[in-house]
Amino acid sequence: MKTLTLNNGNTIPQFGLGTWKSKPGEVKNAVKYALSIGYKHIDCAAIYGNETEVGEALKESFADNVVQREDIFITSKLWNNRHKKDDVVLGLKQTLKDLELDYLDLYLIHWPVAFKPEVIFPEDASGVLSLSEVPLIETWQGMEQAVNQGLVKNIGVSNFSIKKIDNIISNCSIKPAMNQVECHPYLQQDELLASCQQNDIVLTAYSPLGSKDRPDSLKQKNEPTLLENEVIKNIAEKYQVTTAQILIKWAIERGTVVIPKSVSPERIKQNFEAQNINLDTEDMEQIKTLNRNYRYVDGSFFAIPNSCYTVESIWG
């Protein structure tokens, strides 16, 4: 499996298993199967609500000598109600307890949005904190403390704009190693990717297949279906593979990390095998024409009426 080198010299497997939307009762078997066929990178988050089950899968895989802890890469993310400096390590320690691990390989600030510590998801504006009350650099200082305490090897951000990353870089002791964002042919993120590369920050692509299985409440009417795009279908037919496999390989070819989610053994295996496809220059040029700056995960669920957050402010 190919790896990418982070700005501190550590490496990250370029391909991994996403666990967002993986239901309890399904995610354990998915993680165990993925590890058994060669996956080396599992992407988690506290808010996914399934880290305890992922932890069971990891513990059993270690006990059965399927993999060793030092041979796999585990990512998790700080939820919005842990943004205060002193709460960051507390949040990470809870994740470590749930995952039954002594350390993480990568910890990310999940969103540039802050909630009050007692609020998981606010019902109204009274549950949020502004970024002037809890600046992102304060949260980042908590992330740095986690590194200094040996709880995590690498730290980064998720859903951060160029402006927000630049602010962290200008005020940090430890530079972000990663920015995890939605990225696929309909949202190619060329400017953000170039900026991250210039700053020696790796980009991870989430929802690389268009996140068709996300909750209906997060979907728009008549949204485009990436897996059924004619250009992608034609390229898939050319290589006698699935459209999902083409989308995964496209992300790898661009030098990004990619973390498709699945709980189906067949698809987990197909996704893994996508690494073996060789897209040519013509394929990449055709896919490049598909960009429409379309977000499947647009952040509108954080645009709470009368709060300080709008869709524009989240991505700005």
Image (cartoon, rainbow, N blue to C red):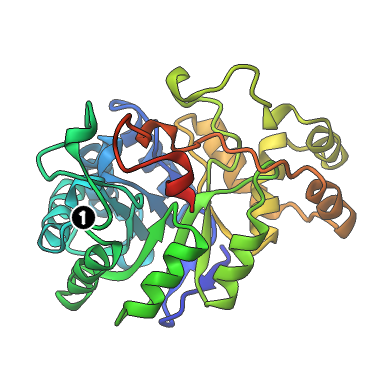
Residue closest to the eye, 34 or 192? 192
Q: Residue at x 41, y 77 (%)?
A: 10
> Would you identify the image quadrant in which residue 296 lies?
top right
Residue 284 placement (x, y as % from top left): 81, 54
Residue 237 is left or right of residue 189, and the answer is right
Q: Residue at x 54, y 61 (%)?
A: 14
Q: Residue at x 65, y 53 (%)?
A: 251
Q: Which residue is mark 1?
A: 83
Quarter containing the N terminus: bottom right
Residue 41 placement (x, y as % from top left): 43, 56
Residue at the front extreme, as displayed? 306
Identity, as a three-letter code, of the amino acid under mark 1: His
**SS at circle 1:** loop
Residue 89 is left or right of residue 247, and the answer is left
> Would you identify the image quadrant in which residue 102 lies?
bottom left
Look at the image and tell me whether residue 52 can be seen: yes
Look at the image and tell me whether residue 38 can be seen: no
